[in-house]
Amino acid sequence: MTEVARPDSFYVEELDGVFGPIQILKYRDAIKETSPLPKLLICESKTPDSTIKTIRNPLLDKWTNHGDIGLLNGRGQVRVVLCCSANANTLLVTERCDNLCLFCSQPPRDVDDTVLFAYAAQSIVSFGSSDVIGISGGEPLLDKKAILNFFKILNEFNDKTPLHILSNGRAFKDINFTENFKEAALKRKIEIGIPLYSASSRTHDYLVNSKGAWNDTIKGLINAGNKGIPIELRVIPTKANFNELSSIVEMALTCFNSITRVSIMNLEQTGWAKKNWKNLYLKPEFYHDELQKTCLLGNRFGVEISLFNYPLCHIPEELYKFAKKSISDWKNTFPPECEYCTIKSDCGGFFSSIKHMEVTPKGRIL
């Protein structure tokens, strides 16, 4: 794995035996000290603080900011889960899921991890950001009681942090839950990212490895859309569905309400995608025409359509305007070949998990 833009995991011997979320402080701040999380003060001296756990750690000091949120695993490992200087922040609230996607980047585990919802809510309140924070899993809506309680905690603190929740949408087939979710969630700006991998149940259910998933997701898209819950439609091209990208998007924009935007997501070589890579991944050069056809649907329907996780040298120039710098900095990298590329500043780069990065620098002087 190559070097990433921002490391997010650190070992701190003094924190061995400490478990759970904690807020990192660089200096005393009355507002931060009223937040619900315990505090960790990083300072240059070794003089302990009588009220706040104090450590001296140059590496953690270098890569964190005042107010960042770290999650401690009890073995001295600190993972910075909310960072003020990050290009994007996402919180994992569960590892459980009712899909078993062949390309899942976070393979599910059937464990009782409900406490993660409470950790996430407390972290969001303490972080106090006006930027969008992602909520991911697993399937965040699988435990309906937990997700509603998550919003209850946020609302009790009058927190207005905008959220993007990544869900397979199946929970919204329950109209009563959909109504309860809307009432609890729409006290803030929110968007639900729901993937649809095919216009047919056979292909979608194959890719998510769950029979009946397509029917549930379609019902969920209908219910959520009809209730006015903003939806980001997500599609991941694979060998099984690359030739129907435009059909999926056209069907969705014709049939469902409240779709705010469409994101075409290039496959990430991690999790279960690694073992299924040869059966799933298709180089973008083999479906450039379908990508362009799909992106042009945005003009017809008045909806933004974007390409995520595509290095610019993997797509034709006419698609550059649709490409986003979407890879989180803690897993984003540029191989050495990119150093003198003339469009590097506009490019989103690569996932650090990719084993063999195919790079064709633009305008490089040999």
Image: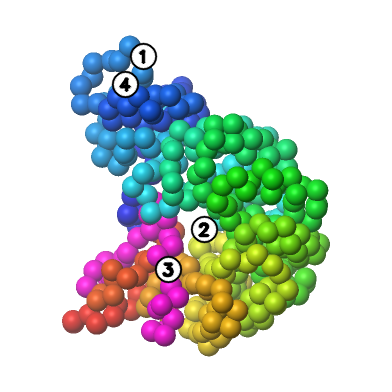
Drawn side of residue 263 relative to residue 30, left or right: right
State whether residue 136 appears in this view. yes
Precedes in sequence: disc 2 or disc 3? 2
The amino acid on which the numbered mark 4 sits, given as a three-letter code, is Thr
- Please tell me whether mark 1 sits on a helix, a strand or a loop: loop
Outermost residue to the top = 50
Q: Residue at x 35, y 75 (%)?
A: 359
Q: Residue at x 69, y 45 (%)?
A: 183
Q: Which residue is mark 3?
A: 324
Instruction: Determine the image quadrant of residue 81.
Output: top left
Looking at the rendered image, the quarter that the C terminus falls into is: bottom left
Drawn side of residue 223 relative to residue 304, left or right: right
Q: Residue at x 58, y 66 (%)?
A: 260
Q: Which residue is mark 4?
A: 54
Q: Residues within 10 Å of mark 4 (few under 14, many from 20)?
A: many
Q: Residues within 10 Å of mark 2 (few under 14, many from 20)?
A: many
Precedes in sequence: disc 2 or disc 4? 4
- Please tell me whether mark 2 sits on a helix, a strand or a loop: loop
The amino acid on which the numbered mark 2 sits, given as a three-letter code, is Thr
Drawn side of residue 66 relative to residue 131, left or right: left
Verify CB contact (< 8 Å) between mark 2 and mark 4: no
**Which mark is drawn over residue 51?**
1
Q: Nearer the viewer, residue 16 or 254?
A: 254
